[in-house]
Image (cartoon, rainbow, N blue to C red):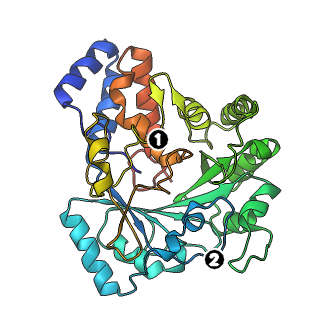
Amino acid sequence: MLPTALAIDRPESVDRVVRRLAGADETLVRRFQAVRSFSRGIRVSEYHLTNACNIRCQGCWFFTFGYDRRTKDQTDLAELRAFVARERARHVNTALLIGGEPTLVPERIRAFVEQMPNVTISTNGLRALPRDGFERVCVAITLFGGGPLDDELRAIRPNGRPFTGLFDTALANYRNDPRVIFFYAITPRGLAHIQGTVRRIRDNGNRVTFNYYSEYHTDDPLRGGHEERLLDEALRVSDLFPGTVVSHPYYVRALVTGRTPFGTFGYDVCPSISWDHPAHAARRANGNPSLPLFNTYGADLQTIHFCCTSGHCDRCRDSQAMQTWLLVSVRQFLHSKETLETWVELAERYWSQFVWSPFAPAA
């Protein structure tokens, strides 16, 4: 999901185009070169660290499609460390740890931190990841709908019992924590909550990027004219809280609509497919970029899943896959100085999410 931007491009030809478009703007050239240099050094894979989770969110693809039953957890820490060492030998240096809920198994997170320079966890926020020993771990906290809608959609125990205050708990656990980025899945049902939710994140000393909420096995909630209203509100709130909302307007439009001026998001262009999964031979040969070496591993650390999310591509609007698509599509932005600047801003904002990135704001 984390893009290796420009990995498939010939640097010389791109450099020539960039210099021509930038003209005398040497600052823009240096910004492009800096974000390209960092991006090209990233090699990422995704790891289901555990099948266990302490809540059952509505719309969670992991449980909706039975990923928790496909593999068994690798609980042997020595085996886990040996696996991470093999991943490093495979030249992977960036780990995205998902679940289930990674904070339930901090010792497994530590096994990655010991060997991987760049680690991100995806968490529901109910448990705090300690700071000691995890200072450079990016903590991506999920949030659905905003306001009371978040509890309705996420605050559900594994036994089905609802509770309240999940967002409040996440805020308390991670107040003024520079590692944190909230992944806020916006939805038309929560239009009235977007501004207030982002304000609370700002006041808590955190930042936010927008995701997109849609339950699987239901009609697309953006049908019926709601798409434009959701987009307008997301852009309006982004303008109100420019230091808090990381999402670039270009990305927000692509996220909500699923489209860009150069194409529509879907399997044929999604780069976040597992490199070693046999189903992708034709996709990898179609000429569209994919992430080199990227795999998604099940909790047994052996099973390679189809892609970074559910494998149900017809409804997927995963935020990280969408961001990756935009960044590896750099050639689609090399038409004018303005479009070049848009891509540079997209890349800088994307990498600013991660505390381990040089583009993260100073603590």
Q: Amino acid at mark 1?
A: Gln
Mark 2 and mark 1: span between their CA atoms?
A: 28 Å
Q: Amino acid at mark 2?
A: Asn
Say whether marks 2 and 1 touch (CB < 8 Å).
no
Which residue was labeled with disc 1? 323
Q: Is residue 146 shown left or right of residue 142?
A: right
Residue at 21% x, 59% y is 91
Residue at 79% x, 62% y is 152
Residue 88 picture location, percent across and down: 23, 65
Residue 199 picture location, percent across and down: 74, 47
Of marks 2 and 1, which one's residue comes earlier in the chain?
Answer: 2
Is 3 or 300 nearer to us in this picture?
Answer: 300
Residue at 50% x, 69% y is 67
Please, is residue 76 above or below residue 8 in the view? below
Which residue was labeled with disc 2? 54
Is disc 2 placed on a helix, strand or loop? loop
